[in-house]
Each structure stands twice: as C-alpha cells, then as structure tokens.
C-alpha cells in the first residue's frame, strides 16, 4: 500500500537509453545509476534494468531495491526510543489548566535516558549504513557481474520484496507505454 501511495503521490523520472535487445555492459563502481541502464524512480532510488527470460528466475535486483527502500523507511522507528530517551534525560515541562508552565526541577532518570539516546543514535547509524544507496549499487553491480548477493541481504529477502519488484516494474512499464503513446 505504501508503494502504491508513493507511486501515485510522487514524481517519477525515467531515464533509459539504448536498444532494448542489446545487453547492458557492467558499469564502473563510480558510474551514475543512469549509466547502468537503470530506471530512475522517486527519491533518487533506481531500479536496475531487468529482462525476464526462461532461465533468469526472480527479479533479485528489484527485490533488493524493495528491501533497501523498506528498511530505510523503517529507520523512522528510531524516533520512538529517541523520544523516550530524551524525556528521561531532560526535565519535563507541563502546563496546568490556567496556562502556567511548570518545569520539573530534575529529569526522571538522566543516566538511563542518556544510555537510551546513545544506543538509539548508534543503532540508527548502523542501520542507515547497512541500507544505504552506495551498498545497493555495489551489491547490484556485483550481482550483475555474476557474484551472489551477500548473505546478510539474501537472508532478508522475502516473497513480498519480489512481489513489490514485480508491481513496480509493471507500473513503470505501463507509465513508459503511456509516455510513448503521448509522444507520438
């Protein structure tokens, strides 16, 4: 559902060049995603070119994109323990029914709050580092070169990621067909 809302509510940029039947060479790691024949989608994420064949199997690169995007979005959940840690580490202010503001003389538990804050920030940095766009680019290019997807990402891939990839590819194909018809 989130994917459908993002598809409908955001602007989508498409960049695709070259013949449809020509194989795409593997670009250097420093190359831009558009150089790899990728389709640019919202928020500067990209969907690598994929052509299904009888022996190709599932759309692993699309599933990886779905996994990375969902995990990056899930990073917002780190705000919950951050708010808890801040409320424990800092004095709390309240307002009574007459509009008078009262600030507590001390925080509830500063050591516990600071510990929660530090753990939350460290956890968020580790999470964001594991699922950043550069890692996705490197994994996609290595996969295109014939190397397997690293186990730390492979074990996280679920059937819903492959379904999201198929849905996104179909939506992009329909959009490109509409654009082609309007351009003629």
Image (spheres, rainbow, N blue to C red):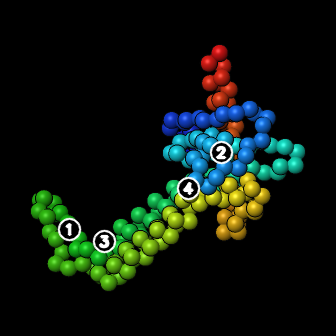
**Which residue does the image show at 36% across and 71% down from the upper left?**
84
Cβ–Cβ under 8 Å for marks 1 and 2: no
| Point 45% across, 65% down: residue | 78
Q: Mark 2 points at which residue?
A: 36
| N-terminal label among 4 and 3 | 3
Q: What element carries label 2?
A: helix
Residue at image position (32%, 71%) is 86
Task: Find the distance from the CA under tag 1 to the CA under tag 2.
Answer: 54 Å
Question: Could you say where residue 92 lies in the image, as x and y percent from the top left?
Answer: 23, 71
Residue under label 3, please give it: 87
Question: Marks 4/3: CA distance?
Answer: 33 Å
Q: Pick the residue in front: 170 or 104.
A: 170
Distance Cα–Cα, label 2 vs label 3: 47 Å
Counting residues from the start of the chain, the first of labels 3 and 1 encountered is 3
Dot 3 crowding, Cα within 10 Å, few <14, some 14–19, many 20+? some
Element on which disc 4 rests: helix
* Disc 1 + disc 4, Cβ < 8 Å: no
Question: Dot 4, how many residues are within 10 Å of its Cα: few (below 14), some (14-19), or many (20+)?
Answer: some
Q: Which of marks 4 and 2 is nearer the N terminus?
A: 2
Give the residue number, with chain letter if any, for mark 4: 133
For image coordinates 63% across by 30% down, the residue present is: 175
Front residue of 88/175: it is: 175
């Amino acid at each position: 559902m989130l994917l459908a809302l993002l598809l409908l509510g955001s602007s989508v940029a498409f960049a695709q060049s070259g013949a449809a039947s020509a194989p795409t060479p593997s670009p250097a790691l420093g190359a831009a995603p558009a150089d790899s024949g990728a389709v640019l989608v919202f928020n500067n994420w990209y969907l690598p070119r994929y052509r299904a064949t009888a022996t190709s199997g599932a759309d692993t690169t699309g599933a990886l994109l779905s996994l990375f995007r969902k995990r990056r979005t899930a990073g917002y959940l780190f705000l919950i323990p951050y708010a808890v840690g801040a409320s424990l580490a800092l004095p709390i202010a309240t307002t009574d029914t007459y509009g008078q503001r009262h600030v507590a003389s001390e925080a509830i538990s500063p050591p516990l709050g600071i510990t929660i804050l530090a753990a939350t920030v460290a956890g968020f940095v580790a999470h964001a580092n594991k699922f950043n766009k550069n890692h996705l680019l490197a994994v996609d290019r290595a996969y295109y070169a014939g190397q397997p997807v690293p186990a730390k990402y492979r074990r996280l891939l679920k059937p819903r990621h492959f379904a999201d990839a198929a849905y996104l590819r179909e939506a992009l194909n329909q959009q490109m067909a509409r654009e082609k018809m309007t351009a003629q």
